[in-house]
Image (cartoon, rainbow, N blue to C red):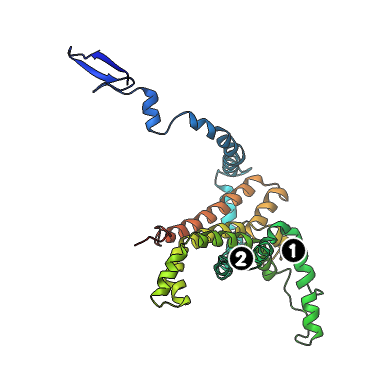
């Protein structure tokens, strides 16, 4: 060890290790920054920061600024025009009426399937692949499949009519239910994969310990697995809700875009690219993002009340 002898300000000598800071002296700037996590490794974040600024922050800031620059009136005219027009304002309720049930349905449908899929059984990979295939289909192909299967002349209605179960084809497309089914099909794989990952992180020994105490499968699930899984379900709900709330092609292809499924994204598109009122279109987009943030904040606020500890079992 290299030792140097220094003369203190008071004239007394101290033996200090090379690089050590004398008592009472202020550390070098480089050391102070390193203690705060500011070092050369931060340069690795530069590409990601440029990517985020260019693709997310700048468009968002540009949209916010544009929404306050209407062609006529004051800075809030675009927002005032949206909230005072019932036809425009009601798109918030219409979109929530579609997105909230879809997100809830995807989460509830994912839990029992993922709960069963976390174990080992023959054909697990094949079943998993079949469940996530809708991700690769895309919205347009899914809508085409729904029209061919559930449309007035689709297989499902022809089967019902030919067997005498109904006298006339059921209206399952070009309305609210067509959009809901399309969003459930496209959103379920994301919810399933997320719930499966959360379930896989729960230590199975916890359920086995409950079983040794005489708990049946329902009590094990309700009292052990579900409380540990609940925070993950809240996060899954938020992600699937955002996907559903941003619905646009499904609302047009299998919905009623001028009536029951005129969602807020359609209102923004019509304002910006049919009426060429870019301020109003930007204002509607900002309102759309604000509604999403409110719902997410409520769900995550409730999530903070749930169990947030470890999901791994101990050796007790």
Q: Nearer the viewer, residue 25 or 249?
A: 25
Pointer 2 residue: 98
In this rendering, would 260 be left or right of 197?
Answer: right
Q: Which residue sits at x=75%, y=68%? A: 146
Figure check: 23 above or below 269: above
Where is mark 1, residue-wise?
A: 143
Quarter location, residue 192: bottom right
In the displayed image of the protein, which residue is found farthest to the front?
1
Q: Nearer the viewer, residue 108 or 132?
A: 132
Residue 261 visible in the picture: no
Assign the N terminus to one quadrant of the image: top left
The earlier-in-sequence mark between 1 and 2 is 2
Front-lying residue, 312 or 218: 312
Residue 163: image tag? none
Q: Secondary structure at mark 1?
A: helix
Front disc: 1 or 2: 1
Residue 33, position as x, y percentages in the image? 39, 28
Give the percent coordinates (x, y) of residue 290: 53, 52
Q: Note whether 273 is above or below 236 in the view shown.
A: above
Quarter location, residue 125 = bottom right
Which quadrant would residue 248 be assigned to in this image? bottom right
């Amino acid at each position: 060890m290299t030792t140097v002898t220094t003369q203190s300000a008071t004239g007394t000598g101290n033996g200090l290790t090379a690089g050590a800071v004398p008592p009472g002296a202020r550390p070098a700037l480089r050391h102070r920054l390193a203690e705060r996590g500011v070092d050369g490794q931060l340069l690795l974040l530069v590409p990601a920061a440029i990517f985020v600024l260019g693709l997310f922050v700048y468009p968002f800031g540009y949209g916010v600024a544009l929404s306050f620059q209407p062609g006529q009136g004051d800075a809030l005219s675009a927002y005032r025009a949206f909230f005072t027009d019932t036809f425009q304002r009601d798109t918030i309720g219409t979109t929530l009426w579609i997105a909230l049930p879809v997100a809830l349905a995807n989460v509830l449908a994912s839990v029992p399937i993922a709960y069963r899929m976390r174990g080992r059984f023959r054909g697990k990979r094949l079943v998993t692949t079949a469940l996530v295939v809708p991700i690769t289909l895309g919205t347009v192909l899914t809508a085409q499949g729904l029209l061919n299967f559930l449309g007035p002349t689709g297989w499902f209605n022809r089967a019902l009519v030919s067997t005498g179960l109904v006298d006339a084809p059921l209206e399952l497309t070009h309305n609210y239910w067509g959009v809901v089914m399309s969003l459930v099909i496209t959103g379920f794989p994301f919810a399933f994969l997320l719930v499966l990952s959360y379930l896989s992180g729960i230590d199975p020994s916890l359920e086995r310990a409950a079983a040794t105490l005489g708990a049946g499968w329902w009590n094990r699930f309700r009292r052990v697995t579900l409380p540990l899984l609940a925070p993950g379900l809240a996060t899954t709900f938020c992600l699937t809700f955002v996907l559903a709330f941003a619905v646009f092609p499904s609302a047009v292809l299998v919905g009623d875009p001028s009536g029951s499924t005129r969602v807020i994204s359609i209102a923004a598109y019509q304002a910006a690219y049919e009426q060429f009122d870019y301020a109003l279109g930007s204002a509607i987009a900002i309102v759309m993002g604000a509604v999403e943030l409110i719902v997410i904040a409520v769900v995550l606020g409730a999530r903070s009340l749930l169990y947030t500890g470890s999901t791994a079992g101990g050796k007790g």
